[in-house]
Image (spheres, rainbow, N blue to C red):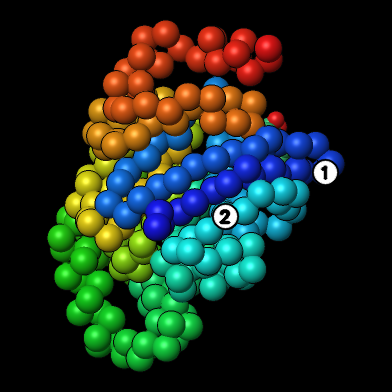
Amino acid sequence: MPLLEIKNLHVGIDGKEILKGVDLSVNAGEVHAIMGPNGSGKSTLAYVLAGKADYTPTAGEVLFNGKNIFAMEPDERAAAGLFLAFQYPLEIPGVATMTFLRTALNAQRKKRGDAELSTPEFIKKVREVAGKLGIDQEMLRRAVNVGFSGGEKKRNEILQMALLEPLLAVLDETDSGLDIDALKIVADGVNRLRARERAFVVITHYQRLLNYIVPDVVHVLSRGRIVKTGGKELALELEARGYAEFHEEAAA
Ligand SMILES: Nc1ncnc2c1ncn2[C@@H]1O[C@H](COP(=O)(O)OP(=O)(O)O)[C@@H](O)[C@H]1O
Ligand SMILES: [Mg+2]
């Protein structure tokens, strides 16, 4: 059974159809990249998996670990092991990053019926995980993402992912704004967390991230559909040729 199975997914926003029948199957242990021109629906796909308001599926189904995710609230999806990272993370003034991370982890543990971690237990865990990822402890005392540089936001996101130990992480790293250091932080985090039981869906407009995260499968999304699937070489072809052929293919 695939970890994530998307079948004929249609999604509309304000009555306009954005996703027009997406099929995608991701097995545990795999890294899939979703590439595609701007406006093709990549972020919409991530939002609908996250359960963001207004992103309503109009047809099709999504099974996560065999369960219909549309029957689950966003926090239930997270507790079941789904993690989503977006390009513009929330800033939370007045809430220390450490507190935020502990609250997030304990909320999930509680939902799963696991004991919550005490403050000393959590501090020990976060030190261990941050140490492995080479993340500075000082950042943890600051308010969540407030005044963080792009690279610090990425470190925070990766730290959160490492703490939550998701089964499936979906990272929407599309568009510009990621400098090379930030790309390397994301790639290093993903590569360290690659595991037999875990899968990643990395959404990116540019091929360059995939120089650092070598995907098992590459999909091209164009006008709300996956129009091509291949191996890691497909990303290189796209880099060389651009997306022009896909605009035309989808228009035909
Ligand atoms: N909240 C929204 N309201 C209206 N249209 C939207 C909204 N979000 C996305 N769209 C439209 O959906 C299409 C796909 O957008 P998006 O998923 O962001 O594409 P990508 O991430 O591939 O660049 C675009 O035409 C965009 O204008
Ligand atoms: Mg996008």
Q: Amino acid at mark 1?
A: Asp
Tag nearer the camera, 2 or 1: 2
Query: Which element carries disc 2, helix, strand or loop?
Result: strand
Q: Position of residue 27 (x, y in %)?
A: 35, 51
Locate residue 141: give its quadrant: bottom left
Q: Residue furthest right?
A: 15
Residue 38 visible in the current orientation: no
Q: Position of residue 75 (x, y in %)?
A: 55, 71
Q: Position of residue 2 (x, y in %)?
A: 40, 54
Q: Residue furthest front?
A: 1
Q: Which mark is residue 183?
A: none
Q: Position of residue 227 (x, y in %)?
A: 53, 25
* First reached walking from the N terminus: tag 2 or tag 1: 1
Quadrant containing the C terminus is top right
Residue assigned mark 2: 62
Q: Residue at x 20, y 52 (%)?
A: 192
Please tell me which residue lies in front, 226 or 12.
226
Locate residue 151: give its quadrant: top left
Q: In the image, 5: left or right of 116?
A: right
Relative height, residue 178 to residue 108 (above, below): above
Distance of mark 2 from mark 1, alpha carbons? 21 Å
Q: Amino acid at mark 2?
A: Val
Q: In the image, 169: left or right of 174?
A: left
Q: Which mark is residue 14?
A: 1
Q: Residues within 10 Å of mark 1 (few under 14, many from 20)?
A: few
Query: Which element carries disc 1, helix, strand or loop?
Result: loop
Q: Residues within 10 Å of mark 2 (few under 14, many from 20)?
A: many
